[in-house]
Image: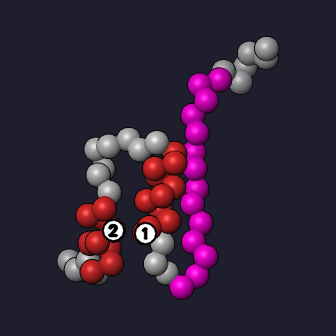
Amino acid sequence: MATKSKRTLAIRAMVDRNNRYAIEEALELVKKMATTKFDESVDVAVGLGIDPRKSD
């Protein structure tokens, strides 16, 4: 089994997996955790709860 890096362990300690964060708070956490030497990206999936078969 591979060991976790110090960076990965530090990032996991910052995030509470049982908590739902507000968008602003989540973006602040992502910016704090960005420690790489390249531009990172974030993907967001939003469930709108819209039925595509019904046009309004």
User: Left of 54 or right of it: where is 17?
Assistant: left
- Residue 9 shown in magenta: no
Kindly indicate whether the residue at mark 2 contacts the one at mark 1 (C-beta within 8 angstroms).
yes
Identify which residue, 52 or 36, lies in the foreground: 36
Answer above or below: position of 33 versus 6.
above
Quarter where residue 20 is shown: top left
State the residue lying farthest toward the right: 56
Q: Position of residue 29 (x, y in %)?
A: 43, 59
Q: Residue at x 74, y 15 (%)?
A: 54
State the residue lying farthest toward the bottom: 37
Q: Secondary structure at mark 2?
A: helix
Identify which residue, 45 or 51, lies in the foreground: 45
Identity, as a three-letter code, of the amino acid under mark 2: Ile
Q: Position of residue 10 (x, y in %)?
A: 28, 72
Identity, as a three-letter code, of the amino acid under mark 1: Met
Segment tinted magenta in the rendering = 37-50
- Residue 47 shown in magenta: yes
Q: Residue at x 51, y 55 (%)?
A: 27
Tell me the distance, in whole angstroms, between the alpha carbons under discs 1 and 2.
6 Å
Q: Secondary structure at mark 1?
A: helix
Identify which residue, 5 or 24, lies in the foreground: 24
Residue 11 - label: 2
